[in-house]
Amino acid sequence: MKGILGAICGDIIGSTREFHPIKTKDFKLFEEESRFTDDTVMTLVISNWLIEDKTSEKVLINQLQYWGNKYPNSGYGGMFRRWLKEDNPEPYESWANGSAMRVSSCSWVANSLEESQKLAKMSSVVTHNHPEGIKGALATSDAIYLAKDGASKEKIKCHIESEYNYDLSRSVDEIKNNYSFDVSCAGSVPESIICFLEGDSYEDTIRNAISLGGDADTQAAISGSIASAYWKIPKNISFNSINRLSYDLLNVLIDFEEKFM
């Protein structure tokens, strides 16, 4: 299986390591307490927006507030929690990686790289309108779209480096030596892309991301969203992740798959 499930599986696998970082790829993929977090909820919010009306910012904001308030304890940042409660929500210059973790649906809906970029920017700017927040969403969506379109890793790497000035020349081992929890796009999206570039499968990509010892669930969601456009997700990972979704979120996933995949 390919598609937006790649972000969801990465989130669920990484959920137990977000505040208990590890620096090894040798770990159990699923624990009893493994669960979906805000990365999954927001990925499916963007999916539902695309199902409803991908041209409407108003629909997007309504979807974000409805689902965000329906799952209030999913792990949102403080500024986003406040945004969810506002009557007339305005973007708040966020540069955090929430824009990148939720963007994958845009690439799967789009019929061109330009459309993918347009949708990705729309999905970001209603909250994450800081240049780095937009950049993180665009770089992630570009990587997913190119992978979906059959591009080689080298082509993806060159495109991201030239378009977004991210340093993708480092290795996972070089990064993890001094890496720690970082929610900024600038400090987590390039590293997540490297985890995909260095990976040899979907699972290996997820293990790379979590082994950095950073924002594990979000970085696994970002790298997993790219990896699932390049490789199929193993059945055991898909099965264990889908079984942890709530009924209404699962229905959004099913609706999205039926309409766009």
Image: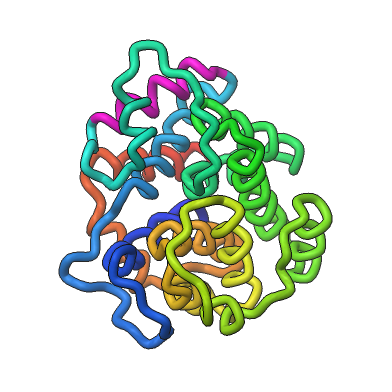
Residue range corresponding to the magenta coloring: 56-69
Does 32 sit left or right of 130 as displayed? left
* Residue 240 seen by the camera: no
Image location of residue 188, percent across then percent down: 54, 59
50, 90: nearer the viewer:
90
Q: Residue at x 58, y 60 (%)?
A: 226
Image location of residue 216, percent across then percent down: 40, 65
How many circles with numbers are drawn on the protein? Answer: 0
- Name the residue furthest left: 32
Q: Main secondary structure of the magenta part?
A: helix
Quadrant location of residue 148?
bottom right
The colour scheme is: rainbow
Q: Residue at x 63, y 43 (%)?
A: 132
Image location of residue 220, percent across then percent down: 45, 64
Image location of residue 166, percent across then percent down: 72, 59
Does residue 182 sit above or below 179 in this rendering? above
- Name the residue furthest front: 178
Q: Residue at x 38, y 33 (%)?
A: 79
Does residue 175 sit above or below 229 in this rendering? below
247, 7: nearer the viewer:
7
* Residue 137 seen by the camera: yes
- Is residue 65 located in the magenta-colored stretch of the structure? yes
Q: Residue at x 33, y 42 (%)?
A: 76
- Is residue 52 located in the magenta-colored stretch of the structure? no
151, 207: nearer the viewer:
207
- Name the residue furthest top: 88
